Image (spheres, helix red, strand yellow):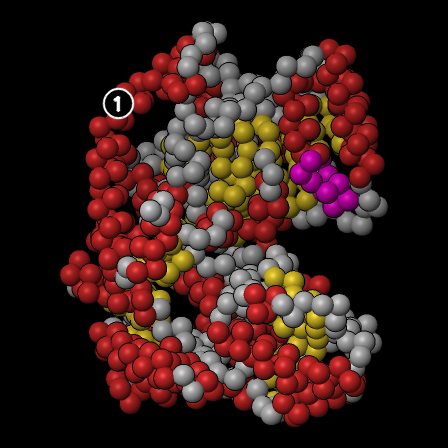
Amino acid sequence: MPGFPQLRTKLQEKLSLSTKLSLKVFIARSAKFARAVVRVPADFLQRAAGAAAAKGIPVPKSWQGKVHRFDPPTLSGADLVNAAQKIATAASARRGSVVSIKTSIVIPVFNKAAFTWQCLCSLMNEIDLSETEIIVADDASTDETSEVLTAMGDVLRVVTNKENKGFVDACNQGAALAQGEYLVFLNNDTEVLPGWLKHLIETVRSDASVGAVGSMFLYPDGSIQEAGAIVWKNGEAHHYGWSGSPDDRRFNFAREVDYCSAASLLIRKEIFEQLGGFDRRFAPAYYEDVDLCFGVRSLGHKVIYQPMSRVVHYEGVTAGRDTASGVKHFQIVNREKFVAKWGAVLAEEHLEKNLKRLADAADRNHARPRTIVFDERIPSPDRDAGSARMFMILKTLAKWGHVVFVPFNRPHGVEYEQALWKIGIETAQIENYVSLLRNKNTRVAIVSRPSVAEALIPRIRRVNREVKILFDMVDAHFIRLEREHEISGDARFAEQAKRYRKIETQLARASDLVWCNSSADKCAIEPEIGGEKIDVVPTIHELHGRGEPFEIRRNLLFVGNLAHRPNEDGLHFFMREVFPRIQLALPDAKLFIVGDNAPATISGYDSEQVRVLGYVPDITSYWRGCRVFIAPLRFGAGTKGKIGDALSYGLPVVTSSVGAESTGLIHETHVMIADAPGEFAEAVIRLYRDRELWDRLSQHGYEHIRANFTPEAIERGLSPSLSRLGLIRQPGAN
């Protein structure tokens, strides 16, 4: 009798996506009811566990929450100073020669030397000191802070005040010394987590309109302190996500926010200087970061919350928690100053305080048109061309509105979902499709691939008839199957082709708009539904530079999903009928086969001269180091992502007429095109040996991608579609 895993696999293979969706919705509703029943006792146990732990009373593990907990530092005295010296020595040993400082981290400090040491420890594991400087503004500390900073030596730049001036002045002092293009303000009572700085910098570099970027703040118990911050119309600030789980998808996508706390905030130095630094009217502390972010926006730039950048914040270590006295008192005083300065902006742009509208208030673009994108799985751009295309489509759509991506399955690791969050794409579970479609701002539902469209189009029409449906065919399945039948003679493919032609035609007719991958696909389906509602959205490629010159490059390369039948068939054709001819002429040339899900028939080719590498996370060295890319496809549909990828690195390609279809690529101008085994082998040999031909194809192929397949080129092509869907307005439209 099969066990549960085997039974689940059999069900997944047999059930349609529509049936799976019905089951998922039923299970989700049952689980929601169960959680509601057990929530009160579970919450009670976790609160009781927290209270007991605070008093040193041991409690059962089952009472405790599942969040990761971070411990405050315990070192003091000579042990603390020695520890600081050790991390500085290790950091100095790793530091290369300083070429130019790109980022300046400014840390204001007042006492709490152990926390400063812990903060610096976490930084040493995170930053590259050859391009990042750490500036510590010691605001007249009276504990071991001076000794700790001295022990760190030239790893730090230190400015010391004789009297305490407060957070605002200390930050401005540190920033005045900064050499970097970017300033990062960081509290000393923080502990940065892996990827903290990288994600901040990548976010600001990805968009010239971004002026400042903030992190997700976690409490030591692992719960959220802040996931972007809100400012209500009355000037009151609110930390969105407070006490929530850092795994909650609501708090895990990048978005434009009112402000981010300066306990971890990156800002372009040029903008900081334009604003005159932190406004001294908010000295010694509080509301200075809110004011700074409002200033960033007043200059036409955005403030972005980036959840992939995370810090643990031991809040209150320096300033305390009591707002009735001490520096914390300025939290109330400075709010009044802030409202006086920004009252007009608050009145025009901000919501009245309403805790039921937290999600709206936490996203400055909450009122923009919302697009829900449904697909079989989360895109894994490094594994298949369809995923790479979908990822770039999502990235483009996010420029014009709020995008929610909803996969039917999540077969790969969380890093692919995180890649979407990082570029501002919200993700949701398929079980919640009804509430997503009923959102007042939802304008468009994109359903990708026939299996998904079959399951969802009728449901979307029932739930919300106002939502426009876009059917993304990706590539025309029936064309690929018809061609496979022509090659193989297998009648099963002919039957499947007939079935898919009927399915894809019906789905296209039921949709408001259709995307296909190539002009050939469009021509094939156009007679069935008319061409006015079909747009071509091919594969999309970012340019990577042309890499190494001809003389340095060696070997042949193939990249593709090896479980995809056109790729598998093409490799068998190449290995049996083409490669033996190439080996006679180029005995030293190896073939590298890179791709996921290699079947045994492909893995069996692995040898000294043919390396079947399987999935490789980063194949940049192959794109830049190999001399010729092969794409020996005998059937398929749509534009071929692998060919565009190769050309985007300046790597010349030998392909078939099927591979070059609908791309505008010309033989001996952009690529070499051959179908017969002997002609294909001769094209590879000639290109491998002829430097002049190689240089011409490398340059012209690269420029062809620039002109037709980059994100900028595709955006121009998408504009008519998005205009018809109501997501953007065409220039000159009323």
> Residue placed at 31% from the left, 22% from the top?
43
Bounds of the magenta span? 125-134
Split into 4 quadrants, where in the image is the C terminus?
A: bottom left
Q: Position of residue 494 (x, y in %)?
A: 35, 84
Q: Residue 398: image x %, image y %?
A: 42, 59
Side (left or right) of 309 relative to 247 = right
Residue 485 is situated, as x and y percent measured from the top left of the image, at 41, 85
The answer to whether one can see residue 730 in this image is no
280 horizontally vs 455: left or right = right
Type of amino acid under label 1: Val
Q: Is residue 131 magenta?
A: yes
Report the residue marked by disc 1.
40
At horizontal 32% and vertical 81% (from top left) the residue drawn is 495
User: Is residue 132 among what the camera can see?
Assistant: yes
Residue sitting at 49 percent across and 33 percent down? Answer: 217
Dominant secondary structure of the magenta stretch? Answer: loop
Place residue 129 in its image quadrant.
top right
- Relative vertical location of residue 146 with respect to residue 412 in this rendering, above or below: above
| Figure check: 633 above or below 442 | below
Q: Does residue 437 sit above or below 266 in this rendering?
A: below
Q: Nearer the viewer, residue 727 or 332?
A: 727
Q: Residue 185 occupies which quadrant of the picture?
A: top right
Q: 305 or 39: which is nearer to us?
A: 39
Residue at image position (38%, 18%) is: 63
- Is residue 476 shown above or below 213? below
